[in-house]
Amino acid sequence: MSNQPVSRRRRSSSRKQKSRRRTLTPRGPKSRDRHWLYQESVQSPDVHFGFFDRAYRRLNGSTPRVLKEDFCGTALLASEWVEWRRENTAIGVDLHAPTLAWGKKYNLARLTPEQRARVRLQRANVLHVTRPRADLVVALNFSYFIFRTRDALREYFRAARRSLAPGGMFIGDIFGGWDTQKPKTERTRHSGFTYLWEMDRFDPVTNFVRFHIHFEFRDRGGIRRAFTYDWRLWSIPEIREILHEAGFRHVDIYWEGIDRRSGHGNSVFRRAERGENAPGWIAFFVAYDGAKRR
């Protein structure tokens, strides 16, 4: 199952980035297909690519070429990564065969033969795929929250570290805030449908949480529980500690700024040692072994 739940409204791209998205080939069937609705609601790969390039260039003075996405789902990120630059190659790893098949049918199929040749998809456990090595290993939209114990999460972080080429970076995102611990449903309107992100339950003893994604259609009907996520809510200090335990020498935190007009995230992430206490927030961790840059 794909794990990209946060609405684009909370991490809206710049006007220039949105314009580029409109020039891309339409993704998948414009229908009531849950995967297409999901991609339209929450995924903006080009916004991520700008951040990846900036973080990698800051450390290495060059741009990354090989990207490995764990929990890749429909492989939208991998598909657009090879469109991003002609030299780019992508590796996508996911256990769910039907979701990978959907991605091949609708996302990879729209690529040119030359671009498709630069994408490698594997149905496998992310703990077991560490070759070929990549400049970037990414686990986006909290997909690694499926690991509920420190030992399990540490094992995954070690696998991610073994997957990196020299100078490589492991990047993941984190979310939190007091709204993530109380039952509520956020609604985001899109063309022809509404996206709903529901926090169903939270256990403060274990930090286990359940979220659902629903879709409502403008004319009638919808899809209840199109996707469900049973996770542990990990904090930034816990993730930092476990990354160091897994062998990473450096872990930087990049905090998302807020758009003053909308009150939502502005997709601008800057390194931070302190964050603003808020109902909801998003950050990235960037873990690496090379020399720490200022």
Image (cartoon, helix red, strand yellow):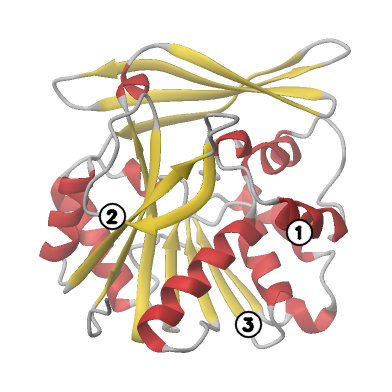
Q: Is residue 217 above or below residue 293?
A: above
Question: Three-letter amino acid code at disc 3?
Answer: Asn
Residue density around tag 3, few if under 14, some if 14–19, many if 20 or more, within 10 Å? some
Q: Residue at x 15, y 72 (%)?
A: 247
In three-dimensional space, the C-alpha distance between marks 1 and 2, rounded to whole angstroms, equals 35 Å
Question: Three-letter amino acid code at disc 2?
Answer: Ala
Helix, strand or loop status at disc 1: helix
Q: Is residue 284 above or below residue 294?
A: above
Specify whether 241 is left or right of 50.
Answer: left
Residue density around tag 2, few if under 14, some if 14–19, many if 20 or more, within 10 Å? few
In three-dimensional space, the C-alpha distance between marks 1 and 3, rounded to whole angstroms, equals 16 Å
Q: Is residue 240 above or below residue 116?
A: above
Hey, which quadrant is residue 180 in on the image?
top left
Residue density around tag 1, few if under 14, some if 14–19, many if 20 or more, within 10 Å? many
Q: Residue at x 52, y 84 (%)?
A: 63
Question: Three-letter amino acid code at disc 1?
Answer: Asn
Using the image as rendered, state which of residue 268 and residue 110 is in the foreground: 268
Residue 89 on image: x %, y %? 61, 81
Q: Which residue is mark 1?
A: 107
Q: Which residue is mark 2?
A: 272
Residue 14 on image: x %, y %? 67, 51
Q: Residue at x 23, y 52 (%)?
A: 153
In three-dimensional space, the C-alpha distance between marks 2 and 3, rounded to whole angstroms, equals 29 Å
Quadrant location, the C terminus: bottom left
Hey, which quadrant is residue 107 in on the image?
bottom right
Helix, strand or loop status at disc 2: loop
Residue depth check, mark 2 versus mark 3: number of the one nearer the observer: 2
Q: Which residue is mark 3?
A: 88
Using the image as rendered, state which of residue 237 and residue 262 is in the foreground: 262
Specify whether 44 is left or right of 160.
Answer: right
Residue 171 on image: x %, y %? 38, 63
